[in-house]
Amino acid sequence: MTKIFFTSTYTLPKMIFFIQSSAVVYLQYVRTVYLAKEYIQGINSKVKA
């Protein structure tokens, strides 16, 4: 019983940290993709005009 408790107290912070870092990376990726799309659209509209 104590072993399970110890493992969960040890693993939980690691999992939370992993989820947080994954979320940060994912958000940065989404932002980069969004900015790239905006940038490409801007170039396309300049080329057409």
Image (cartoon, helix red, strand yellow):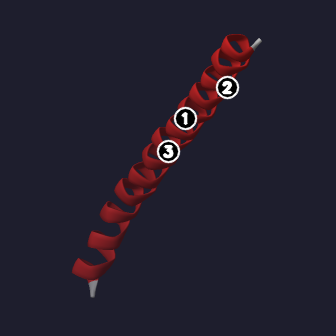
Circle 1 Cα neighbour tier, 10 Å, few/some/many (<14 / 14–19 / ≥20): few
Asked which secondary structure carries label 2, the reply is helix
- 2 or 3: tag closer to the N-terminus: 3
- Cα–Cα gap, marks 2 and 3: 22 Å
Q: Residue at x 60, y 33 (%)?
A: 31
Residue 10, percent from left and from top: 31, 61
Q: Residue 33, which numbered label?
A: 1
- 1 or 3: tag closer to the N-terminus: 3
Q: Left or right of 29: which side holds 47?
A: right
- Cα–Cα gap, marks 1 and 3: 11 Å
Q: Residue at x 27, y 81 (%)?
A: 4
Residue 16, percent from left and from top: 45, 56
Q: Which residue is mark 3?
A: 26
Looking at the rendered structure, the kind of residue marked 3 is Tyr
Report the number of discs: 3
Numbered disc in front, either 1 or 3: 1
Q: Which residue is mark 2?
A: 41
